[in-house]
Amino acid sequence: MEYVDNSQKRNLIWIALLVIVATVIPFAISSFWLRIVTGVLMWIGLAQSWNILAGYMGYVSFGHGAFFGLGAYVTAIAMSLGVHFIISALIAGVFTAAFAAIIGYPTLRLQGAYFAIATWAFAEAIRQIVLVLPFTGGAYGMRLPPMLNENFFYYMMLLTIIGTVAIAYYLMHKAKFGLKVKAIREEEIAANVLGLDVTRIKISVFALSAFFPGILGGIYAYWITYIHPDSVLAPVIADQMVVMTMLGGLGTIAGPIIGAVVLFMGNRLLWVFWGDTSFYLVLVGLAVALVILFLPSGLVSLVPRLGKKDKPKVDDQPNSSVTEHTK
Amino acid sequence: MKFKTKWTIMVVVLLSLSLLLSGCGGPKQSDDGKNAEAERDYFKVGVITSLSGASVYGGNVTRRGYDLWAETVNAQGGIEIGDKQYKVEMVYADAASDPATGADAVERMVTTDEVDFLFGPYTSGVTLGVAPILEKYKVPMITGSAESPLIWKQKFKYTFGSIPAVDLTGSAPVSTLVNEVEGGAKTIAVIGVNDAFSKATAEAFKANAEQLGLEVVKYDIVPEGTDFTPLVGAIKELNPDVLAVGGHEQTHMEVIKAAKSLGFMPKAFLMHYGITTPDFINNLGTASEYVFGGAVWTSDLEYSDELWGSTKEYVEAAEARWGNMPDYTEAASAATGEVYAAALAEIGAVPPLSEEEREQLVDALENIKVDTFYGPIDFANEGDWYHNNVGLQPLTIQLQNGEQKIVGPSDVKVADPIYPVPGWEER
């Protein structure tokens, strides 16, 4: 019992340390690097959101970028009507979650490749609709009033990401809800037979995984000040969420964080040093290929403690070593 | 054992973090930078454009223009300020055709590289993404490419553009077809692809047509990748005098092919950017003949300037350096440097530029009118085209015998417009 307490204490120290470092970062680094770190945070949130759906429930979506784009547009439209940014971003999150619930009702009946294609098609439909709607600026995009304060956006991203990671950790690793979700991933029919309300759980998870990208899209829109279907509704956004999560490790809390940090940071570092040619893109591609080839469970498998899968502790035994199971 | 591993990880993480923090430029580093900066005797010029991503082709076109200017200026000893010459050093960053990446790049160029001024992006989207950051740091940028009218309506103080927005250039060809040809066009159909540039072009054609009393029989904005055959078929039934298209070269080729396959020949095709590219002419052969377009610059114009001498000499230099004929974007990018040089000479500012000098540079750019091989560059100081170049005359061009000929307005034309154009079988 005492050992568990110590371990928890150490975890707390760890988290406290991270929070302190995260809080002082804006005062320690230049505005350029702060932008990069803000970008890293955004991608951690996006990858983690995708992981909630794909990693824990086993539903691979290739249209998750649409929620990011919708969030950006909802925020931009709300702000153009005079709504405060924070309220606008929250509206965006609620809107994308509700939207996901509606979209999820028919599409979550599909599985595997069919679900992936349906979500991809849904994202493309959203992109085309935004291109023709009168109040989204269509092909001209939308501009938001600039607020040129890098620290503000850093802390907004940080808060959202802490929320995303904490909720994902609590729901998927601590709460009973996580067990139900993982039951669906492992064997959906069995979960249904056991009496789980599978449809409701699936829709809740889908809505949750769309809530954070909605808010992040809103912060992005206000931060970059200009949004266009090609920048916030591009298929590459969903692709990056997928690649980051796979690179870091699917179905773990640390995986998407590591994946996002490594991929986005790596990309930007190579871009800084070899940015006058596009050779850095070849290096990024090569690095991703190598990891997938030699570390199929992601970078997280390099650190066994972080890489352990998400099985919640069902007993209170000290030292209950959780076996690492790969799919 | 477990405990030890944890501590190892923690130490590694902390070490990496401290490395990150120290490597990313604390106050000490920038102090050193300042000393080196004070001795700099050349201009540091940032180039932010699309070196990868969807717009890499266009990005390289702008880069060729900017580079040729830098190479030519340096070969002649540098920008002359007072009685001394100062060379230029180009610093590049890839905007990856993405506004967020462009914004990161500009932040770095301004804060880390401490560039004196910037050459801007190929796309309008990236331009809109980076402009607010330049407002924050008060560093001027001139883009030699972005053509969306939206940019200039935002009234960014530090952003300028040497290519007139597309809604400024669409008027000439419509006016030529209505007023300067025998029989004058009476009806027009306008189609455009739903991207910013193409849509703005189509809107400009439509607005000018309506203003000049043409009857617009059809106006359609279609998604990218549309099959044009049914659309052109429907337009054939309406039989307009002119079919105007807002798009890029691929769209133009597809529309012409669809019209040819349906045997539809209006009295004139009117297009814009893209019809002057080698691809358009090579791909379509004789079908590309007689197509009308709008432009502000062609290689057979006769302007003169101090750097190259004349338009002809610039074209020869560009062909010798890059192996192909420069288009108007490449030319505008090359001319952009001449405006900076003239403005810097006027205010007598030497590198490195202080914030005050950059402010003076912006004032000078606002008021200067520079004659270049590309034509006069004169930035507007008010209205919907704020800081866009309004010095150029929009031209009507027509492809005749595989060459782009200026056929309007009548006071500058080098050839007569051919209208109505010969049918498909008569070529």
Image (tube, coloured by chain):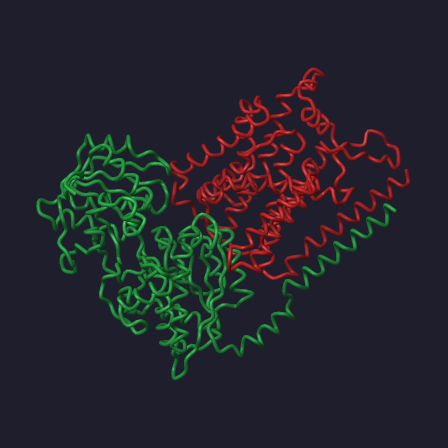
Chain colours: A red, B green
> Number of numbered discs present?
0
Above or below for B141 versus B100: below
Residue lying farthest right?
A2
Instruction: Looking at this view, name the residue that lies furthest to the left.
Output: B182
- A215 left or right of B230 in image: right
Relative placement, left or right, of A247 versus B299 is right
Residue B133 against residue A165 in the figure, above or below: below
Q: Position of residue B252 (x, y in %)?
A: 29, 43
Image x and y of residue B80, in percent: 38, 78
| Residue A28 is at least partly visible in this image | yes
Where is residue B71? Give x, y as percent: 41, 70
Q: Residue at x 34, y 66 (%)?
A: B366
Residue at x 78%, y 32% (from the top left corner): A312
> In this picture, is A17 found above or below A165?
below
Asked whether B331 or B95 is in front, the reply is: B331
Based on the displayed image, in which of its 4 quarters is residue B316 positioned? Answer: bottom left
